[in-house]
Amino acid sequence: MLNVYGMIALAALLGEFMLGVWVDLLNLRAMRPDPPPGFEDVYDSERYRRSQEYTRARAAFAIWPRAVGLALVLVVWFAGGFEALDRALRALEMSPTLTGVFFIGTLVAGRAVMMLPFRYYSTFVIEERFNFNKSTLGTFFSDQLKFLLLGSLIGGPLLALVLVLFERGGSLAWLYCFAAIASLTLLLQFVAPAFIMPMFNRFSPLDEGALRDSIFGYAKSVGFPLSKLFVIDGSRRSNKANAFFTGFGRQKRIALFDTLVERHSVEELVGVVAHEIGHYKMKHIARSMVLSIAQMGLMLWLLGFFLGSQPLYSAFGISEPSVYTGLVFCSLLYTPVDLLLSLFMSARSRKHEYEADRYAAQTTGKPEALAAALKKLAADSLSNLTPHPAYVFLHHSHPPVTERVAALLSMARSPQ
Ligand SMILES: [Zn+2]
């Protein structure tokens, strides 16, 4: 039963799992007893010990959802679950598109339900233990419900469209799908900041005062039209702080977590905003979006290529090929390509972080303020200061904070 498609998918699933475990082990072994030089002021020995304990706790936990997710796929696959589900749905004699929506919907929902206890444990046991969690059970479950609703309302019709296009679109189906998905992705850039994000957080304009004046003064000095500067109630869910830039055109906005505003000085916050504006000015956001849309195109093209291949279906025990089963199996086969592309995207993102830091340093003239903010942020979220390079390579979209701080401080010493 295990033909070449089956072997590739199996090797990819097992390989990805083992790679994750191996890199986690490397990361744990890279820990050192004392904080790196220059970080003693924000990590006293007690905090440093707790940051290592937190890293260990997260690593020990992370293996479980991954192992269960893998086991779930393997059990469904080798117990003939795909075929059984397909037969059960076909017996209802719905249209192929609707059958497909239910087939994929069942798999996605099944996986989400299996993962729910892990999300719960991560929030209410691990994050709680390290005093990060602020979510109530009410917030937690209403979040899950909103994810489910949004996923069904946006994902459901999109999936139906993709299935119809591949059923009827002939050899160019992938291209039609690509056009549809790319348009939706662009549309979401405008819809998400205005309608979706406010479903999860309250966005309030930053209060009048020295901070607001300094940030607007800075934005003006670099010619950035800052009209939407918000504080969001990140403290509803977690003690961890953050800031982000989102949207395009008139919808572009910068959001600072309330936890960030509370704990940082005006200079530090201007540094953080300058970093976010740096991302925009250097077109990081737009270029990353173009790349991820191109990535989607590649995936759809590969999909169109493999959908007609009979051995793909027999590898997973399916007797009657269909677009929707093909879609699921291609996504399993796609694992290694996906991994390679995500490594590439993370490496780009790490480079962009340095660029945005440099932009902030040069335009504010205060690299040490951003460095201080980064150190405080790391200490407050108990970041691991000594991630193994392989771990960074595999998982991190941001460079290690020690390296970002070193780069900023070297700019402070020799300003360009
Ligand atoms: Zn950044």
Image (cartoon, rainbow, N blue to C red):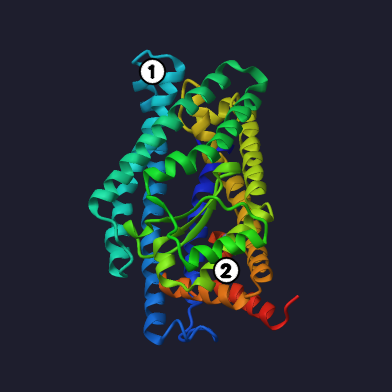
Answer yes or no: is residue 79 visible.
no
Q: Is residue 306 above or below residue 353?
A: above
Name the residue located 57 percent from the left edge and 25 percent from the top edge.
310
Name the residue located 49 percent from the left edge and 51 percent from the top edge.
14
- Mark 1, secondary structure of its residue: helix
Q: Could you tell me the amino acid type at mark 2?
A: Gly
Q: Is residue 239 above or below residue 226?
A: below
* Residue annotated with mark 2: 271
Residue neighbourhood size for the residue with mark 1, other residues' Cα within 10 Å, grouped as few (<14), some (14–19), many (≥20): some
Closer to us: 311 or 322: 322
- Mark 2, secondary structure of its residue: helix
User: Which numbered dot is residue 90?
Assistant: 1
Query: How far from the left and from the top, in percent, is residue 77?
Result: 42, 37
Closer to us: 388 or 267: 267
User: Which numbered dot is residue 185?
Assistant: none
Residue neighbourhood size for the residue with mark 2, other residues' Cα within 10 Å, grouped as few (<14), some (14–19), many (≥20): many
Query: How far from the left and from the top, in percent, is residue 94?
Result: 39, 14
Q: Could you tell me the amino acid type at mark 1?
A: Arg
